[in-house]
Image (cartoon, rainbow, N blue to C red):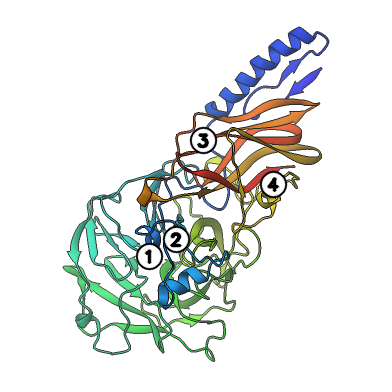
Amino acid sequence: MKVLPMRKCCQIQLPISNLDFRLHWKLVLATLATLATFAATAAETFCNPMPIPDTPVGVLCRDARNGDVIPESGWMRDCWARAACNLSEVRQYRELADPVVLAEGDTWYLYSSAGLMWTSEDFGGTWHHVPVQEEAGYAPAVAKFRGKYYLCTSGGPLSVADSPTGPFRTLGAFDLKSFSSDPQMPQTLDPALFVDGDRLYLYWGCCAKPKSVWGVELDPADPRRALVPGSAVCLVEFDREKYPWLVNLIEGAWVFKRDGMYYLTYATYGTEDSRYCWCAMKGPGPLGPFVPQKKNPFFMTEKGLVTGTGHGSIWCDRNGDWWINSCVVVCAYHGFERLLAQDRLFFEPDGDIVVGKATETPQWLPSSGRKGDTGWKAIPLKSARPEATDGSLKTWSAVEGLPSKTVFEVPGERTIRSFRVIWRDLGLDTNRGVRPGPYRYRVEYRSNGEWWTWLDASKNDVDLMVDYREALEAKADAVRLVVLSAPPGITPGLVEFTVFGD
């Protein structure tokens, strides 16, 4: 008897003595397998980098066309020079960064640099893009205060809405003169908003000035102004003797409260660096005084697929579980080329924050009723595309001549449970009409010398740079990726193909 195990479905036994009967039922089971994949209940796992649909074109390359000359000097030149490819000509890229998550009941709202807003109704299993009319800028900050939703971005104005999805109405720029007259006070770069009961606070700073991170209580009647004129205070100094973990600047402040303790966190090393990390301070009130926790940085992941995990948000879901969302450095074409990550966060008995390293294998979602790592490992794969299995976001293999088939050999026979495909849009050139869009493909597995459909995405209509999916639980000694089509003018770049299982 041949057994085809199907996750979330009954096992079906197939007699192999009659070849015709066997072939007939192979077609039936392949169809059932595909249907079972899409008929399955909500996703139970997630995997970094986060699979966010409609990842926007990078802010700093939107006006560029492929082949444009990179500036010879200045800040823009430096941003391109930090890329792994050491480009001499502009190549468009896509980016997400600086994530802020607002949880309200069963709905999670994600705000990110470059594209602004996504929602999830299944606890982060899938995300849906909420289009906005205009670009919001970098480093969004959002908070619900007195029934309204306030939003601001790096150096930008304050806006307000009646819903977390907008539309947002611009209130205007922050009144810096009402904050402080100290010449060391920086502009409102990398802002964060924090609500403490019936009080609203603003934090900001992205610099290496002696006085780097500031905070102020805002006036509820006009949140652009300080409640008390001149009351803004410096909360973190750029002092390497005092804080030896600081490198080139302090940025990405985030404040939250737990069990009566106030936490001020921030990032250092720089967003293009694999060592980009989180540091934390604790204090008795929303404006401190803050002192560093024992371990700093408390979250740094500098090796592996998911690195550079700094600047984001820390928040608590309705179950009382804590999460941290961060950037993921890509930096293949540009220093600001990034993706997003999400991990669980924990606390020591004394309240210090603990995370460990960023995960890059499947983790349980709240919808599963379980927590932590699934135990599914990345199965070692061998193929004619070694760049697709080298564990790096900076390398890729061009998939030309569609449809194209790539076989990935599995050592021995393994149980496979889910997979992740990461794409690069080779030839992306929006100013010449070459735009991103969905990839269509099929993933097959080989068992007992025969190929079976594992997951059919031949009608996929979702634009996913990172495509993570749970599939049928099966035994396989090889997996085959069949790329069927790509957006017009785009050549698929296969950055990474990972199969997870036992």
Sort mark 4 into few (<14), some (14-19) or many (20+) by Cα contacts within 10 Å: some
**Amino acid on which disc 1 is placed:** Ala
Is residue 224 shown above or below 461? below
**Amino acid on which disc 2 is placed:** Ala
Q: CA–CA distance between discs 4 and 2?
A: 29 Å
Q: Are marks 1 and 2 in contact (CB under 8 Å)?
A: yes
Residue located beneath label 4 in the image: 385
Going 46% across and 56% down the picture, which residue do you hit?
93
Q: Position of residue 461 (x, y in %)?
A: 45, 34
The label on residue 380 is: none
Q: CA–CA distance between discs 2 and 3?
A: 26 Å
Secondary structure found at label 3? loop
Decide which of 301, 354 is in the foreground and name it. 301
**Amino acid on which disc 3 is placed:** Ala
Is residue 154 shown above or below 344? below
Which numbered disc, 4 or 2, marks the residue that appears first in the sequence?
2
Q: Are marks 2 and 3 in contact (CB under 8 Å)?
A: no
Q: Position of residue 72 (x, y in %)?
A: 44, 75
Going 53% across and 76% down the picture, which residue do you hit?
269
Residue located beneath label 2 in the image: 97
Secondary structure found at label 1? loop
Sort mark 3 into few (<14), some (14-19) or many (20+) by Cα contacts within 10 Å: some
Q: CA–CA distance between discs 1 and 2?
A: 7 Å
Please tell me whether mark 1 or mark 3 is closer to you in this view. 1
Q: CA–CA distance between discs 3 and 4?
A: 32 Å
Which numbered disc, 3 or 4, marks the residue that appears first in the sequence?
3
Residue located beneath label 1 in the image: 139
Q: Are marks 1 and 4 in contact (CB under 8 Å)?
A: no
Q: Is residue 288 left or right of residue 278?
A: left
Going 40% across and 87% down the picture, which residue do you hit?
209
